[in-house]
Amino acid sequence: MKIHTFTSEETEKIGRRLAEHLKPNSIIALDGVLGAGKTVLTRGIARGLGITGIIKSPTFTIICEYEGRLPLYHMDMYRISTDDEFEMTGGKELLTSGGVCVIEWSGNIQESLPADIIHINIKVITPEEREIEIEGIEL
C-alpha cells in the first residue's frame, strides 16, 4: 500500500492509524533518508498507543522506551553496523518483550529480524510530499 502525505500532521495521522492494528511483539522496520519523516511517523504511532510525552529521534541513545497501551521501543540503527552490535544494545531481547518495536535504519540488522514484520519506507517526493509504502499490514 502506498500513501502520499503533504504535511507532518498527515504523516503522524498515518502512524496513529497504524497503532490501532499493533499487537504485542509487533515489529516495524522503518526506512527512509535523513529528514524523510521517520520520527514523525513514530510520534504518530506513540500517540496511537496513548503515549503523550516528547518523541525524539534515538540517534545517539540508540533505543528510547515509552510506556503506553503497549510499550514502545523506538530504535535507531544508523550507528549500528552488525547484528552482534544490535544484540549488545539489548535490542534483540526487546523484539519479543511484548511491546512494539519501531526500528529506523533496519537494514543494518536485517539478519536479526524475523520475516513476518511490517516494512515501511518513506520517500521524499518534494519538500512537502512524502510517499509512505507499507508492507505486512493492512490499514
Image (cartoon, helix red, strand yellow):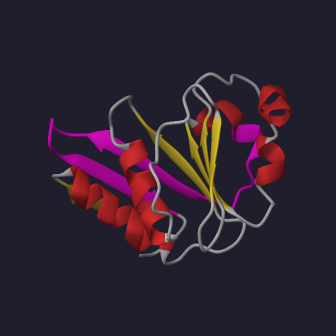
Could you tell me which residue is drawn at 15 percent across and 35 percent down? Answer: 127
Residue in the foreground of this view, choosing between 3 and 59: 59
Query: Which residue is at the front of the view, 62 or 67?
Result: 67
Specify the segment rendered in magenta: 110-135
Judged left or right of residue 91, residue 120 is left
User: In the image, is 112 to the left or to the right of 16?
Assistant: right
Quadrant occupied by the C terminus: bottom left
Taking 95 as reference, is 111 above or below it? above
Residue positioned 39% across, 73% down in the render: 17
**Quarter of the picture holding the N terminus:** bottom left
Q: Position of residue 67 (x, y in %)?
A: 63, 62
Q: Residue at x 45, y 70 (%)?
A: 48
**Residue 48 against residue 113 in the figure, above or below:** below
x and y, in percent, of residue 55 in the image: 46, 48
Q: Is residue 114 within the magenta segment?
A: yes
Q: Measured from the top left, where is residue 9 in percent x and y?
A: 23, 57
| Residue 119 percent location from the top left of the image | 53, 54
The part of the image, by quadrant, that contains residue 83 is: top right
Q: Tell whether position 115 is magenta.
A: yes
Residue at the image position 38 percent from the left and 31 percent from the top: 33
Quarter holding residue 107: top right
Say whether residue 1 is visible: no
Work out whether residue 12 can be spotted: yes
